Image (tube, rainbow, N blue to C red):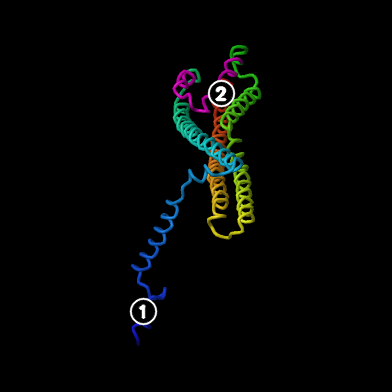
Amino acid sequence: MSNAAGAAIRSTPGSRTPVERQRGHWLTLNNYFHVVAQVNFWEMVRSTDPIPIAVMVVLLMFSLLSWTLIFSKGSLFRRAQRANQEFLRAFRKGERLDAIAAASAQFPAAPLVAVFDFGYAEVTRQMAVRGKIINPLALERTLQLGISEEMTKLERSMNWLATTATVSPFVGLFGTVFGIIEAFQTLGLTGSTSMRSVGPGIANALFATALGLFAAIPAAVFYNYFGHMIKEIGARMEDFSLEFMNVTERTWE
């Protein structure tokens, strides 16, 4: 077998060693990152028309808003879940509702505390009138009002995440279409098919697409994740309302 034939056999993909394949993979990645590093994003933005710039600004604002909400809501839900667990342990260990009411001030971040305050206020009102629970249905409705109020607080600003997840891809698509139109217009004016003439428009189009996805994907993921956490906290409040009703019935009826 000749040297040329041997070299051809050694160069086929199936005959390459794992080390050679890994080396080729890293070379491909290095070439990709080298190309990305050569892109001057500031020069691309500076030479862009006002409409694509407006699209990019809108998408950056959506992204900044969504990440701000993600961090704030994530912190709020973690503190709420932790405080709920601590208050629930204190509630189950407590023997009297007035003692639990005094201790509930230690858990201001717990939605269960707000539900407890609604129920305790109704119990106090009924006890002041007759000395016992005379209207369990009113107590149940009061607890439901507390749950509804806390659910409203938890769901506050969630619509902005939904809006970002829904609207950002279409805003990015608008920038993409405008960039492609600009590329074809440049192609028609110059009569050249080189990348130098159509490259800026295509780059703007792809950059708008990337910004739209960068804003939409985290917003959609965390909207669903936070929605699950809100449902979990809501179910915990429903269970707590039943537990509160049982305690009051055993104590005063």
Residue 155: horizontal and vertical position, in percent?
Answer: 58, 33
Residue 140: horizontal and vertical position, in percent?
Answer: 63, 26
Residue 206: horizontal and vertical position, in percent?
Answer: 55, 51
Kind of element beneath mark 2: helix
Query: Dot 1, crowdedness within 10 Å: few (<14), some or many (≥20)?
Result: few
Residue 184: horizontal and vertical position, in percent?
Answer: 63, 54
Q: Quadrant of the N terminus?
A: bottom left
Q: Which residues are magenta?
A: 99-125
| Count of numbered marks | 2
Residue underneath mark 1: 7
Q: Is residue 27 left or right of residue 202?
A: left
Q: Is residue 102 magenta?
A: yes
Mark 2 and mark 1 lie on one chain; the one further toward the N terminus is 1
Q: How far, Cα to Cα, is label 2 from label 1?
A: 87 Å
- Determine the image quadrant of residue 82: top left
Q: Is residue 61 above or below residue 173?
A: above
Q: Quadrant of the C terminus?
A: top right
